[in-house]
Amino acid sequence: MPKDDDITSFSKLKEEVNLALPQCIERVLGKVAEYHAKHVDEGSESVGQEVLKKLQEINANFKYIVSTSIMEKKGAGYHTSSAVFWDAETDGTVSYRWENKAMICIVHTYGIGI
């Protein structure tokens, strides 16, 4: 793989980001056995910060946006979408869905070339 300085296309990082996202989520939510609404803000913020820190370690050549959603696993529907206007050659996104018996966590990451 090229040096970090040489990577200017987020698509070249997608595989590594896909591997890192579940690890980051698991570090924060892995031992949480029950959904508690009063802890969701803190958990969501912690997951987002953990992912952001890891993305910067992977490659600092991008601006990053991390969006985290945590919801109780009750069988309810969840729909999300995003629209972007960017340079497809340098920018990109990776989304990951993690779940346990009590909750679902969805993380969307966006890498924007500097």
Image: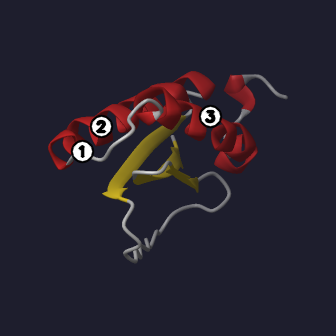
Give the SS element for disc 3: helix
Label 3 and label 1: CA atoms lie apart by 21 Å
Instruction: Return the disc, 2 or 3, that comes first in the chain's sequence.
Output: 3
User: What residue do we see at 45% from left, 40% from top?
Assistant: 63
> Which of pointers 3 and 1 lies earlier in the amino acid sequence?
3
Left or right: residue 5 compared with residue 65: right
The residue type indicated by label 3 comes to Ala
Whole-percent x and y of residue 1? 85, 29
User: Position of 97 compared to 48: left or right?
Assistant: right
Q: Please, what is the three-letter code of the amino acid marked with disc 2?
A: Gly
Q: Amino acid at mark 1?
A: Val
The residue depicted at 76 percent of the width and 22 percent of the height is 3
Task: Please determine whether, in this image, residue 99 is positioned above or below residue 20.
Answer: below
Q: Residue at x 48, y 37 (%)?
A: 25
Foreground tag (3 vs 1) = 1
Q: Secondary structure at mark 1?
A: helix
The dot on residue 20 is: 3
Q: x, y percentage for residue 12?
A: 75, 44
Closer to the camera in the image, 2 or 15: 15
Q: CA distance from mark 1 to mark 2?
A: 5 Å
The residue labelled by disc 1 is 40
Question: Depth check: 59 or 99 in front?
Answer: 99
Between marks 2 and 3, how big is the CA–CA gap?
17 Å
Which image quadrant is residue 5 in? top right
Q: Between residues 104 and 24, which one lies in front from this camera angle?
A: 104
Q: Which residue lies at the image location 37% right of the left edge and 38% below the top edge?
A: 48
Dot 2 surroundings within 10 Å: few (below 14), some, or many (20 or more)?
Answer: some
**Residue 50 coordinates in the image, percent (x, y):** 42, 28
Q: Residue furthest right?
A: 1
Q: Which residue is mark 2?
A: 43
Marks 1 and 2 close (CB-CB < 8 Å): yes
Q: In the rendered view, would you say 79 is above or below 65?
A: below
